[in-house]
Image (cartoon, helix red, strand yellow):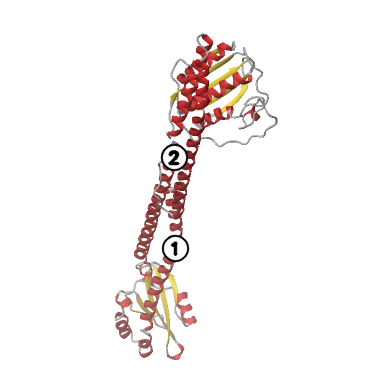
Amino acid sequence: MRRTLVLVSLAVTSMVALAFLIPLALTVREIARDRALTTAERQASALGPVLVITEDPAALEQAVGSTQAGAARRMVVHLPDRTMVPRTARDDTRALGDQLTKAALRGRSFTARVRGGYSLLQPVRLPEGRTAVVEVFLPDEDLSQGVWKAWLVMTAVAAALVAGSVAVADRLGARMIRSTRRLAEAAGAFGDGDMSVRIDPDGPPELIEASLAFNAMADHVVQLLAAEREMAADLSHRLRTPLAALRLNAEALGRGPVADQTREAVDRIEREVDQIIRTVRKPTGRGSCDAAKVLRDRVSFWSVLAEDEGRSCELIGAEAPAPLPIPATELAAAVDALMGNVFRHTAEGTDFAVTLHQGQGVTGILVADAGPGIADPDAALKRGSSGGGSTGLGLDIARRAAEATGGYLRIHRSVLGGAQVQMWFRTKWLPPAPRRSRRLVRRSSRV
């Protein structure tokens, strides 16, 4: 942008300078020419009274020598009998005979091209109808005297003006670029989770308005997030009462495998509720996690229920670390949503597998099952839409987790015969891609 402003300023000022410089240069040349011709004509006219009084060659030669052009041997008088005064004038500066005749017939001065310059021919009427012609030779350098110096000065002035305008445009562009970069950096930091970032308005009025709008937007977003965190914490806190009752009932079961599994499940639920309350009350920015570790933990958690229902649960590719630019809690919530859908929408005994795939710049988590599959993937991705009696938020939670890193979520047919939900994450965080509108054909039986 800064370079563009400089180039535009350079082009505009150069065209303006040329638009004035070219006509002015031509005018200066014409002024120099007219000045030289006027001076020569004035000196030629000074011999008119002398020719009327006398035609004596000695007197005429003295009169010619008293002029500036005569002293420089550039003036000669052609008498009616074709006698030339003074006779010492150079032959290469003389006008031709037909040019002298033409000047005498016209009765007024005019210039004729000769070798090395121009000759000003000034006719003088003498008694008895005779005509003498005063010739003043003007070399080419006299006609352009001072022109090159004037052109050089004008070029230097034009170049200085162009350079000054370019410098001013560069300074203005630098100021605008600094303000724009600060706004972009603040927006990037805000997108990375730094909710305290604000901008000191500076720069052009438009950027000042944009900075003020950004600050107002940031304040409003912080207020909305705080309200959501408090509401989520309050809702999570309400679960403590039924959990307390559930714990009492679990303790009353006595001893045995079923009772121990029930109490362990209640403990895990209670830990999850506590973690939710701590998380929503403490604002955090974007973080990172090891996807392999998260998958091992979540598969271990769901494998207890899978064993009770006779399901085969397999985790593939989670041996090596797989860093992702997303908090562990968000990834765990997305994985729980997908695995919860398997238990909720497939019959007991249906096998499923979780695969971790690491590619170039992306990491994929694939949850596949051997169930009936998803008839309409587009409708299943619509938030709040469910044909299976659930909330309709499961797949949307997973999709938003993937898009938070610049990735995406896809639904395909798995090799097990059922559905395969793919979450693809970018390993380098990028701003979320805009949501594309989807036309729904029919409702799905899975969330």
Q: Please tell me the numbered disc located at residue 190.
A: 2
Task: Determine whether 22 is above or below 212 in the image.
Answer: below
Q: Secondary structure at mark 2?
A: helix
Residue type at mark 1 is Ile
Residue at point 38%, 74% (across, down): 35
In the image, is 76 to the left or to the right of 271? left
Judged from this view, the residue extending furthest toward the right is: 442
Task: Determine whether 261 is above or below 284 in the image.
Answer: above
Q: Quadrant of residue 423?
A: top right
Q: Please tell me the numbered disc located at residue 22.
A: 1
Q: Position of residue 359 (x, y in %)?
A: 49, 22
Q: Position of residue 356 (x, y in %)?
A: 51, 19
Task: Determine whether 193 is above or below 387 in the image.
Answer: below
In the image, is 414 to the left or to the right of 189? right
- Tag 2: Cα neighbours inside 10 Å, few (<14), some, or many (≥20)? some
Residue at point 38%, 69% (across, down): 143
Q: Position of residue 240 (x, y in %)?
A: 49, 27
Determine if residue 177 is in view. yes
